[in-house]
Image (cartoon, rainbow, N blue to C red):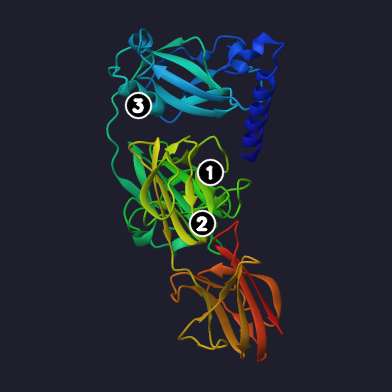
Amino acid sequence: MKTFINKLFAISLLLLTFSSCEDDAEFQHPAGLTTLADVSFSAPIVATPNKVVLSEANSFESVLTVSWLDVKFPIEAPVTYTLAIDVVADTFGENAWANAKRISVGEDVLSVSLLGKELNEYAASLNLAPDVKGELVVRVEAYMDRYVYSDSVVVQVTPYFEEIATGEVYIPGSYNGWDPSTASKLMAIGPDVYEGYLTINAPHGLGFKITPEQNWDKFYGLDGNGSLALGADGDLTFPDYGAYKITVNLNTLSYSIVPHSWGIIGPSTPGGWDADTDMSYNYTTGKWEYVGLLAPGAMKFRLNNDWAVNYGTEDGNSGEIENGKVYLDNPGAHTITDGGFYKVTFSVDPNTPEEAIYSVTSEPYSWGIIGDSTPGGWDTDTDMTYDFSISKWKFTGALVPGALKFRLNDEWAVNYGTEDGNSGDIVDGIMYLDNPGAHTITEAGDYEVVFNLDPSNAGTAIYSVTKL
């Protein structure tokens, strides 16, 4: 984002420089440099294939790919591409392409593919009749300092009638103690096709199975060939800790697990404009969440650490806000006016994917130590103090021999413990979310205890215990 802003600044300087050149009339145009240059698509766009018959069988397969050559603007800067889809009748006259469906492709991306389900939904929204051959028109729109449009291409499309998908399945696994009654659910997106999200944190295992109901009466596992099979013993497994999108197709007994994480980015966030701060998916609320420190400044949302899919506000909302809206590819950002601890939630509107609902609320946020080595024993937290100079929580004081754990807001709902009961002085040790282990203090004395969540994995925390 910084690079893009710097490039725009450079463009502005160039425009000012050229507009001040009295000897060169070409650059006296008040609209600037690039509006006087001829910019266009150098070759026709290509739609492959140009005839598509859609059905439930290919609803989750790539059925149409549109590609093009890059558009050269006189200035070196990212070019944003959008695919527009419309019916032939709406591409003429004063309101041509006004009703088109537009798909954001991204900066300097030169192709886009559509799944059968996606193309079928666009065809239905443009009033093409099911099971009847119809025509859609596609074109590509390039934008840098103005829009440039490709010639249009006609694609023959036969849509199908799509029944509204209902139902759900569950994915009990190591992350929730293999309990189907509390497991994350995958929602139907087609007949016997389900999709959902999950964030897996250490030290829980990575295995899970699929149950049609919230019990073990019937379940799917992996057979010896790696395919889903009813009653199979093999576990499905996540590749590693992190956030994923899980898709299960019980028609073909297949599944996919792909990285999928929403993050916050901007000068108010721990990573600034340089790196996302990942959010965790709360499967009990169906929202992505971040709880932690935010500084004054801007904040946006983006998918998978990339600007290809991002959401921003229309008007730069500031302060605390609940159930606000952010919009796909909108340049605005939420503004944090006062630094502090906040809870941020985010969820894309399933009925209007161009919009997402978010909230930013200040949060009671205090980490404490607890255990029989601490002043409060197991009964009361001993609060730590946040040290803004090192961005860590700190306790300095007397400890006695015994156990020590960390918990949030004087409750066990969020707590961290060790895997193996580390004892003695330790620097940059690791604790794990909801782990029953505890650090052991072996000798009474004055100690400095430091704690902070691992920014790359909410399931782990970094801590140190140093005898003074």
Query: In front: mark 1 or mark 2?
Result: 2
Say which residue appears at 56% left-offset and 37% top-offset. 307
Which amino acid does the dot numbered 2 rest on?
Ile
Q: Nearer the viewer, residue 329 or 61?
A: 329
> N-terminal of the two: label 3 or label 2?
3
Q: Quadrant of residue 4?
A: top right
Tag shown at residue 200: 2
Decide which of 2, 89 is in the foreground and name it.
2
Query: Judging from the image, what secondary structure is the residue with disc 2 in?
Result: strand
| Numbered circle sitting on residue 21 | none
| Mark earlier in primary sequence (1, 2) | 2
Q: Quadrant of the C terminus?
A: bottom right
Residue projecting furthest to the front: 22
Q: Which mark is residue 121?
A: 3
The residue carrying mark 1 is 225
Give the x, y percent position of residue 219. Answer: 38, 52
Label 3 and label 2: CA atoms lie apart by: 32 Å
Q: Where, by quadrant of the figure, is residue 17 drawn?
A: top right
Decide: is 341 above or below 449.
Answer: above
Q: Nearer the viewer, mark 1 or mark 3?
A: 3
From the top left corner, tell me how far across and down residue 146 is, in percent: 53, 20
Give the residue type at disc 3: Glu
Are there few (<14), some (14-19), or many (20+) residues within 10 Å of tag 3? some
**Residue under the point 41% across and 19% down:** 85
Of helix, strand and loop, which one carries label 3? helix
Instruction: For label 1, count other residues whose C-alpha is less than 10 Å away and answer few (under 14), some (14-19) or many (20+).
Output: few
CB atoms at circles 3 and 2 under 8 Å apart?
Answer: no
Q: Earlier in the sequence, mark 1 or mark 3?
A: 3
Q: Quadrant of residue 1?
A: top right
Residue 234: in sight, yes or no?
no
Q: Percent x, y for residue 450?
A: 63, 74
Q: Amino acid at mark 1?
A: Asn
